[in-house]
Image (tube, rainbow, N blue to C red):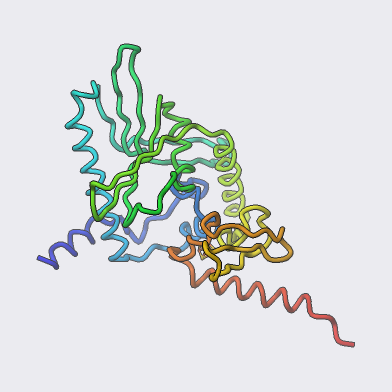
Amino acid sequence: MADAIHDYIRSQQKDDPNYKRTMGHFRSSEMGFCERQIIATFNIPEEYDATRAGYNVTGNVVEDFVRKVIESKAKDLELDYIIPQHNIIWNIDWEEGTEVRGKADFLMLLKDKAGTQKHLVEVKSARSIEHIKEPMKHHRIQVMPYILEIQPTTTSIVYIDKNNLNNVKEFFVEFDDMIMGYIHEKAKRLHGFQMRGETPFAEAKYCPKCRSGKLKVDHTARPKTATCQPPGCGQTMKLDDTDLWQCGYCGVKDWCDKLERLKEKELVQIEQPAKN
Ligand code: SF4
Protein backbone atom coordinates (compact mmCIF):
# COMPACT_ATOMS: atom_id res chain seq x y z
CA MET A 1 0.00 0.00 0.00
CA ALA A 2 2.82 2.42 0.88
CA ASP A 3 4.29 1.97 -2.60
CA ALA A 4 0.87 2.56 -4.19
CA ILE A 5 0.55 5.87 -2.27
CA HIS A 6 4.07 6.97 -3.24
CA ASP A 7 3.36 6.11 -6.90
CA TYR A 8 0.07 7.97 -6.87
CA ILE A 9 1.64 11.11 -5.39
CA ARG A 10 4.47 10.88 -7.93
CA SER A 11 1.92 10.62 -10.77
CA GLN A 12 0.16 13.81 -9.58
CA GLN A 13 3.25 15.98 -10.08
CA LYS A 14 3.58 18.07 -13.21
CA ASP A 15 7.30 17.53 -13.70
CA ASP A 16 7.51 17.20 -17.45
CA PRO A 17 11.26 17.63 -18.16
CA ASN A 18 10.41 19.43 -21.41
CA TYR A 19 8.20 21.97 -19.66
CA LYS A 20 9.64 25.46 -19.98
CA ARG A 21 8.16 28.59 -18.51
CA THR A 22 7.46 31.50 -20.83
CA MET A 23 9.71 34.48 -20.19
CA GLY A 24 7.85 37.44 -18.73
CA HIS A 25 4.93 35.32 -17.45
CA PHE A 26 5.03 35.34 -13.66
CA ARG A 27 2.86 33.61 -11.10
CA SER A 28 0.90 35.62 -8.63
CA SER A 29 1.87 33.11 -5.92
CA GLU A 30 5.59 33.82 -6.44
CA MET A 31 5.50 37.62 -6.54
CA GLY A 32 6.25 37.83 -2.81
CA PHE A 33 9.33 35.63 -3.24
CA CYS A 34 12.98 36.44 -3.74
CA GLU A 35 13.75 37.81 -7.21
CA ARG A 36 16.72 35.54 -7.76
CA GLN A 37 14.72 32.46 -6.82
CA ILE A 38 11.89 33.41 -9.23
CA ILE A 39 14.25 33.87 -12.18
CA ALA A 40 16.07 30.61 -11.34
CA THR A 41 12.83 28.64 -11.69
CA PHE A 42 12.73 29.62 -15.38
CA ASN A 43 16.19 28.19 -16.04
CA ILE A 44 16.73 25.34 -13.61
CA PRO A 45 14.41 22.33 -14.10
CA GLU A 46 12.69 21.37 -10.88
CA GLU A 47 13.66 17.94 -9.61
CA TYR A 48 11.07 15.66 -8.06
CA ASP A 49 11.06 16.08 -4.30
CA ALA A 50 8.95 13.43 -2.54
CA THR A 51 8.52 15.49 0.66
CA ARG A 52 7.36 18.61 -1.19
CA ALA A 53 5.10 16.48 -3.40
CA GLY A 54 3.52 14.96 -0.27
CA TYR A 55 2.81 18.43 1.14
CA ASN A 56 1.30 19.56 -2.17
CA VAL A 57 -1.12 16.64 -2.18
CA THR A 58 -2.07 17.37 1.45
CA GLY A 59 -2.80 20.95 0.34
CA ASN A 60 -5.17 19.60 -2.34
CA VAL A 61 -6.90 17.40 0.24
CA VAL A 62 -7.44 20.45 2.48
CA GLU A 63 -8.87 22.43 -0.46
CA ASP A 64 -11.23 19.58 -1.23
CA PHE A 65 -12.31 19.62 2.41
CA VAL A 66 -13.05 23.37 2.20
CA ARG A 67 -15.06 22.84 -0.99
CA LYS A 68 -17.22 20.24 0.80
CA VAL A 69 -17.72 22.63 3.72
CA ILE A 70 -18.81 25.45 1.39
CA GLU A 71 -21.19 23.11 -0.47
CA SER A 72 -22.71 21.89 2.80
CA LYS A 73 -23.40 25.49 3.77
CA ALA A 74 -24.70 26.53 0.36
CA LYS A 75 -28.33 26.76 1.48
CA ASP A 76 -27.64 28.74 4.68
CA LEU A 77 -25.39 31.15 2.83
CA GLU A 78 -27.83 31.49 -0.08
CA LEU A 79 -24.95 30.50 -2.22
CA ASP A 80 -25.60 30.77 -5.93
CA TYR A 81 -22.56 28.84 -6.93
CA ILE A 82 -18.89 28.33 -6.33
CA ILE A 83 -16.21 28.75 -8.94
CA PRO A 84 -13.20 26.77 -7.86
CA GLN A 85 -9.79 27.50 -9.36
CA HIS A 86 -10.71 30.81 -10.95
CA ASN A 87 -7.98 31.75 -13.44
CA ILE A 88 -6.77 35.32 -13.82
CA ILE A 89 -4.29 36.96 -16.19
CA TRP A 90 -3.13 40.49 -15.42
CA ASN A 91 -1.36 42.14 -18.33
CA ILE A 92 1.41 44.35 -17.03
CA ASP A 93 2.89 45.33 -20.38
CA TRP A 94 1.26 44.26 -23.65
CA GLU A 95 4.17 45.24 -25.85
CA GLU A 96 6.85 43.48 -23.82
CA GLY A 97 4.57 40.53 -22.99
CA THR A 98 4.87 40.90 -19.23
CA GLU A 99 2.01 39.38 -17.26
CA VAL A 100 1.04 37.92 -13.91
CA ARG A 101 -1.14 34.81 -13.84
CA GLY A 102 -2.83 32.99 -11.03
CA LYS A 103 -5.55 30.67 -9.85
CA ALA A 104 -7.80 31.96 -7.10
CA ASP A 105 -8.98 29.05 -4.96
CA PHE A 106 -12.72 29.75 -4.53
CA LEU A 107 -15.02 32.46 -5.72
CA MET A 108 -18.35 32.19 -3.96
CA LEU A 109 -21.35 34.00 -5.38
CA LEU A 110 -23.71 34.80 -2.54
CA LYS A 111 -27.16 36.21 -3.14
CA ASP A 112 -28.65 38.62 -0.67
CA LYS A 113 -31.43 41.21 -0.85
CA ALA A 114 -29.02 43.83 -2.16
CA GLY A 115 -28.01 41.67 -5.09
CA THR A 116 -25.15 39.32 -5.75
CA GLN A 117 -22.14 39.45 -3.47
CA LYS A 118 -18.86 37.93 -4.50
CA HIS A 119 -16.65 36.47 -1.82
CA LEU A 120 -13.16 35.34 -2.74
CA VAL A 121 -11.49 32.71 -0.57
CA GLU A 122 -7.84 31.77 -0.73
CA VAL A 123 -7.01 28.65 1.26
CA LYS A 124 -3.58 28.08 2.78
CA SER A 125 -2.70 24.92 4.63
CA ALA A 126 0.28 24.89 6.98
CA ARG A 127 2.01 22.49 9.33
CA SER A 128 1.20 24.85 12.18
CA ILE A 129 -0.84 28.04 12.24
CA GLU A 130 -0.08 28.94 15.88
CA HIS A 131 2.34 31.73 14.94
CA ILE A 132 0.09 33.27 12.28
CA LYS A 133 -1.43 36.46 13.67
CA GLU A 134 -2.10 38.24 10.36
CA PRO A 135 -2.05 37.28 6.67
CA MET A 136 1.50 36.48 5.59
CA LYS A 137 3.10 39.11 3.37
CA HIS A 138 3.57 36.86 0.33
CA HIS A 139 -0.05 35.65 0.58
CA ARG A 140 -1.38 39.24 0.66
CA ILE A 141 0.76 39.94 -2.40
CA GLN A 142 -0.58 36.81 -4.13
CA VAL A 143 -4.26 37.75 -3.77
CA MET A 144 -3.96 41.38 -4.93
CA PRO A 145 -4.07 40.60 -8.69
CA TYR A 146 -7.06 38.32 -8.00
CA ILE A 147 -8.89 41.18 -6.29
CA LEU A 148 -7.97 43.57 -9.12
CA GLU A 149 -9.25 41.22 -11.83
CA ILE A 150 -12.25 39.63 -10.08
CA GLN A 151 -13.43 42.67 -8.08
CA PRO A 152 -14.99 40.64 -5.26
CA THR A 153 -17.13 42.28 -2.58
CA THR A 154 -14.97 40.70 0.13
CA THR A 155 -11.81 38.58 0.19
CA SER A 156 -10.39 36.38 2.90
CA ILE A 157 -7.31 34.25 3.34
CA VAL A 158 -8.07 31.12 5.36
CA TYR A 159 -5.25 29.27 7.13
CA ILE A 160 -5.91 25.64 8.04
CA ASP A 161 -3.69 23.46 10.18
CA LYS A 162 -2.77 20.31 8.23
CA ASN A 163 -2.50 18.37 11.49
CA ASN A 164 -5.92 19.37 12.75
CA LEU A 165 -8.54 20.72 10.35
CA ASN A 166 -10.41 22.23 13.30
CA ASN A 167 -7.60 24.77 13.69
CA VAL A 168 -8.61 27.57 11.35
CA LYS A 169 -7.82 31.26 11.09
CA GLU A 170 -9.47 33.66 8.65
CA PHE A 171 -8.26 37.14 7.75
CA PHE A 172 -10.10 39.61 5.55
CA VAL A 173 -7.95 41.44 3.03
CA GLU A 174 -8.63 44.74 1.27
CA PHE A 175 -7.34 45.90 -2.08
CA ASP A 176 -4.06 47.77 -1.68
CA ASP A 177 -2.73 50.06 -4.40
CA MET A 178 0.78 50.05 -2.91
CA ILE A 179 1.02 46.27 -3.19
CA MET A 180 -0.21 46.38 -6.78
CA GLY A 181 2.46 48.97 -7.55
CA TYR A 182 5.07 46.71 -5.96
CA ILE A 183 3.98 43.72 -8.10
CA HIS A 184 3.85 45.85 -11.24
CA GLU A 185 7.39 47.17 -10.72
CA LYS A 186 8.73 43.78 -9.71
CA ALA A 187 7.28 41.98 -12.75
CA LYS A 188 8.76 44.62 -15.08
CA ARG A 189 12.14 44.44 -13.32
CA LEU A 190 12.19 40.63 -13.46
CA HIS A 191 11.30 40.58 -17.14
CA GLY A 192 14.06 43.15 -17.74
CA PHE A 193 16.58 40.81 -16.07
CA GLN A 194 15.41 38.02 -18.35
CA MET A 195 15.67 40.06 -21.52
CA ARG A 196 19.19 41.22 -20.63
CA GLY A 197 20.20 37.72 -19.49
CA GLU A 198 21.11 38.98 -16.01
CA THR A 199 20.83 37.32 -12.61
CA PRO A 200 18.97 39.41 -10.04
CA PHE A 201 20.48 40.06 -6.65
CA ALA A 202 19.79 37.69 -3.76
CA GLU A 203 16.78 39.69 -2.57
CA ALA A 204 15.96 37.56 0.50
CA LYS A 205 19.43 38.09 1.97
CA TYR A 206 19.25 41.87 1.71
CA CYS A 207 17.62 44.61 3.75
CA PRO A 208 13.95 45.05 2.70
CA LYS A 209 14.17 48.78 3.52
CA CYS A 210 17.20 49.99 1.54
CA ARG A 211 17.90 46.85 -0.60
CA SER A 212 21.62 47.56 -0.54
CA GLY A 213 22.94 46.09 2.73
CA LYS A 214 23.12 42.37 3.53
CA LEU A 215 21.32 41.25 6.68
CA LYS A 216 23.22 39.93 9.68
CA VAL A 217 21.17 37.94 12.17
CA ASP A 218 21.52 38.23 15.94
CA HIS A 219 20.48 34.76 17.14
CA THR A 220 20.85 35.75 20.81
CA ALA A 221 18.21 38.51 20.71
CA ARG A 222 14.63 37.62 21.68
CA PRO A 223 12.86 37.84 19.29
CA LYS A 224 15.75 37.38 16.85
CA THR A 225 16.79 40.49 14.96
CA ALA A 226 18.53 41.25 11.67
CA THR A 227 20.75 44.28 11.07
CA CYS A 228 21.45 45.80 7.68
CA GLN A 229 25.21 45.84 7.04
CA PRO A 230 27.24 48.57 5.26
CA PRO A 231 26.82 50.07 2.71
CA GLY A 232 23.16 49.76 3.67
CA CYS A 233 21.01 51.80 6.05
CA GLY A 234 22.22 50.00 9.20
CA GLN A 235 18.68 49.49 10.55
CA THR A 236 17.88 46.69 12.96
CA MET A 237 14.56 44.92 12.51
CA LYS A 238 12.71 41.83 13.70
CA LEU A 239 13.91 38.80 11.77
CA ASP A 240 10.26 37.95 11.00
CA ASP A 241 9.93 41.23 9.11
CA THR A 242 12.56 40.13 6.61
CA ASP A 243 12.43 37.50 3.84
CA LEU A 244 15.50 35.62 5.06
CA TRP A 245 13.29 32.65 5.98
CA GLN A 246 12.79 32.00 2.24
CA CYS A 247 16.41 30.84 1.94
CA GLY A 248 15.58 27.84 4.14
CA TYR A 249 12.99 26.63 1.62
CA CYS A 250 14.81 27.69 -1.53
CA GLY A 251 15.45 25.05 -4.19
CA VAL A 252 18.49 26.93 -5.58
CA LYS A 253 20.16 27.82 -2.27
CA ASP A 254 23.49 26.05 -3.03
CA TRP A 255 23.82 27.77 -6.38
CA CYS A 256 22.88 31.15 -4.86
CA ASP A 257 25.31 30.83 -1.93
CA LYS A 258 28.10 29.95 -4.36
CA LEU A 259 27.29 33.00 -6.47
CA GLU A 260 27.34 35.23 -3.38
CA ARG A 261 30.72 33.86 -2.30
CA LEU A 262 32.12 34.53 -5.78
CA LYS A 263 30.68 38.04 -5.73
CA GLU A 264 32.23 38.76 -2.34
CA LYS A 265 35.57 37.42 -3.51
CA GLU A 266 35.48 39.69 -6.56
CA LEU A 267 34.58 42.69 -4.41
CA VAL A 268 37.46 41.96 -2.03
CA GLN A 269 39.82 41.80 -4.99
CA ILE A 270 38.55 45.11 -6.32
CA GLU A 271 38.84 46.73 -2.89
CA GLN A 272 42.40 45.55 -2.28
CA PRO A 273 44.85 48.45 -2.54
CA ALA A 274 47.28 48.16 -5.44
CA LYS A 275 50.81 47.13 -4.38
CA ASN A 276 53.58 49.50 -5.48
S1 SF4 B 1 18.98 31.31 -1.25
FE1 SF4 B 1 17.73 33.00 -0.52
S2 SF4 B 1 18.56 34.79 -1.52
FE2 SF4 B 1 19.29 33.02 -2.64
S3 SF4 B 1 17.82 32.71 -4.31
FE3 SF4 B 1 17.19 31.44 -2.59
S4 SF4 B 1 15.73 32.70 -1.45
FE4 SF4 B 1 16.89 34.05 -2.79
Which residue ends up furthest to the top in the rendered image?
113
Q: Quarter of the image containing the C terminus? A: bottom right
In front: 8, or 163? 163
Q: Quadrant of residue 72?
A: top left
Image location (x, y in percent) of residue 189: 61, 48
Q: Residue at position x 26%, y 29% from top? A: 82
Q: Residue at position x 64%, y 65% from top? A: 214
Image position of 135 with respect to 219: above or below: above
In front: 145, or 14? 145
Image location (x, y in percent) of residue 274: 85, 82
Relative to 12, 100 lies left or right: right
Q: Quadrant of residue 12?
A: bottom left
Image position of 119 with respect to 165: above or below: above
Which residue ends up furthest to the left in the rendered image?
1
Image position of 152 with respect to 227: above or below: above
Which residue ends up furthest to the bottom in the rendered image?
276
Image location (x, y in percent) of residue 199: 59, 61
Task: Count all numbered tags in the image, as a single digit.
Answer: 0
Image position of 29 with respect to 257: above or below: above
